[in-house]
Image (tube, grey):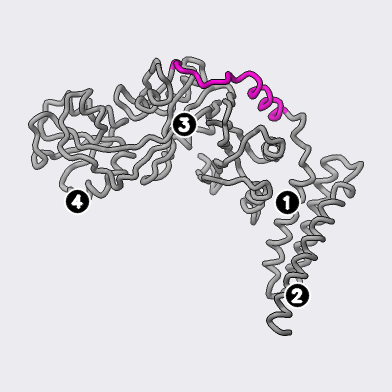
């Protein structure tokens, strides 16, 4: 067979595969007529396991490739058969209700929970999101979650990832234990400064206070000045206040320009972060599901079964709808051995019936699932 002939044959085979996939999808619903959901699940599970086992038993050099191909096909076929699944589920009704009752405009003012004290980046973000935020401060991220969950505050501001230092794992680990929804996110440009009392020289500094994220974002500067002791505190604003209130003249804080003015400190070194392109993404959370007009980003939490290809099968469902996954974060489940929760962000509007159906399918599976919201 010549190169030209082989190329033409590949095109013919691809078209045959496309035709057969279309035919298989078309008749799959007919094959399940008059069966209950459990009967369908058992029938499919039995057939698919036997079929994949038969592929492996042939010991062909490409049987692993065939296994991946057919596993993906089976997963997509399940999604196709469930295209109308979400119509009357609890989650679908919850989303429809939120779309109906959410105000047409994001609120201008509210009681907002932030971690830290005045001058914290969370407070700066709150003032960016709301024109008039009545801010209540909490020592920990967990306190912010609890304030929103209890109704003490209408909204809460939390950092979840930094462009140069990665995810804020403490926040991700707390998500699973609280009842909340994301209503908005905001990317804040972060510029770190080395702040000290007026008159303090750089060579006088023996100890630096800051939050672990800020320390990580300034790791290059701290490595170059390894003689300076690093002490972690709850927040960059707390670091600035600690220096301002200290009797010592050999301490400094890694904090924001806002905190320099707020706590009467001077900038000893400017822009000490590892990169100028340094952004932290914050989320604004509420207790009740609210979906404001224009919301186009969706976040979920889910567990996956301990089977080969479970993640790939799930991702294929998103791919089949043309959804763009913007983040996948895995975190170990506390108290378990090698079990992980996955946090997924993707671009999708719940005005789409197909997206709602996908969310309802994932929610119906035996593994753990939480819809965190669709937001602006």
- Secondary structure under the numbered disc 3 in the rendered image: strand
Q: Is there a contact, CB below 8 Å, between mark 4 and mark 2?
A: no
- Asked whether the viewer can see residue 305, the reply is no
Q: How far apart are marks 4 and 2 (CA)?
A: 61 Å
In the displayed structure image, the side of residue 189 where residue 368 appears, left or right? right
Seen from the viewer's position, the closer of residues 356 and 51 is: 356
The residue segment tinted magenta is: 90-111
In the drawing, does residue 213 fall left or right of residue 104?
left
Q: Mark 3 points at which residue?
A: 283
**Tag 1 residue:** 76
Residue 303, by quadrant, is top right
**Would you name the residue on which mark 2 appears?**
9
Q: Earlier in the sequence, mark 2 or mark 3?
A: 2
Residue at left 50%, top 43%? 331
Q: Do the residues labelled 3 and 4 touch (CB within 8 Å)?
A: no
Kindly report which numbered mark, 1 or 2, lies closer to the viewer in this rendering.
2
Label 1 and label 2: CA atoms lie apart by 26 Å
Which residue is tagged 4? 224
- Disc 4 residue crowd, few under 14, some 14–19, many 20+, Cα 10 Å: few
Report helix, strand or loop for mark 1: helix
Asked if residue 108 lies in the magenta stretch, the reply is yes
Return the disc, 1 or 4, that comes first in the chain's sequence. Answer: 1
Q: Earlier in the sequence, mark 3 or mark 4?
A: 4
Task: Pick the residue in front: 227 or 167.
Answer: 167
Give the image location of residue 313, x and y in percent: 66, 52
């Amino acid at each position: 067979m010549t190169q030209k002939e082989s190329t033409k044959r590949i095109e013919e085979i691809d078209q045959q595969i496309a035709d057969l996939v279309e035919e298989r999808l078309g008749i799959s619903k007919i094959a399940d007529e008059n069966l209950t959901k459990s009967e369908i699940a058992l029938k499919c599970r039995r057939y698919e396991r036997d079929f994949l086992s038969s592929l492996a038993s042939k010991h062909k050099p490409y049987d692993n490739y065939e296994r991946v191909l057919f596993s993906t096909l089976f997963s997509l076929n399940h999604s196709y058969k469930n295209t109308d699944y979400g119509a009357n589920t609890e989650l679908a009704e919850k989303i429809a209700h939120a779309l109906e009752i959410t105000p047409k405009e994001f609120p201008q003012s509210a009681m907002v929970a932030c971690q830290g004290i005045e001058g914290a980046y969370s407070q700066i973000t709150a003032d960016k999101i709301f024109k008039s935020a009545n801010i209540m401060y909490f020592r920990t991220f967990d306190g912010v979650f609890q304030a929103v969950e209890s109704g003490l505050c209408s909204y809460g501001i939390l950092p979840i990832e930094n462009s140069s230092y990665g995810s804020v794992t403490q926040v991700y680990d707390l998500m699973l234990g609280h009842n909340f929804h994301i209503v908005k996110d905001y990317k804040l440009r972060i510029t770190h400064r080395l702040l000290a009392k007026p008159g303090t020289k750089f060579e006088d500094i023996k100890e630096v206070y800051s939050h672990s994220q800020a320390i990580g974002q300034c790791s290059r500067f701290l490595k170059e000045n390894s003689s300076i002791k690093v002490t972690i505190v709850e927040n960059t604003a707390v670091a600035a206040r600690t220096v301002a209130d200290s009797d010592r003249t050999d301490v400094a804080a890694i904090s924001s320009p806002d905190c320099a003015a707020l706590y009467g400190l001077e900038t000893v070194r400017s822009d000490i972060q590892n990169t100028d392109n340094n952004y932290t993404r914050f989320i604004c959370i509420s207790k009740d599901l609210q979906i404001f007009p224009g919301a186009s980003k969706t976040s979920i939490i889910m567990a996956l079964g301990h089977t080969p290809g479970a993640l790939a099968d799930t991702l294929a469902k998103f791919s089949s709808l043309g959804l763009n996954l913007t983040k996948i974060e895995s975190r170990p489940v506390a108290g378990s051995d090698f079990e992980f929760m996955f946090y997924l962000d993707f671009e999708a509007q719940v005005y789409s019936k197909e997206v709602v159906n996908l969310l309802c399918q994932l929610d119906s599976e035996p593994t753990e699932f939480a819809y965190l919201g669709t937001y602006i």
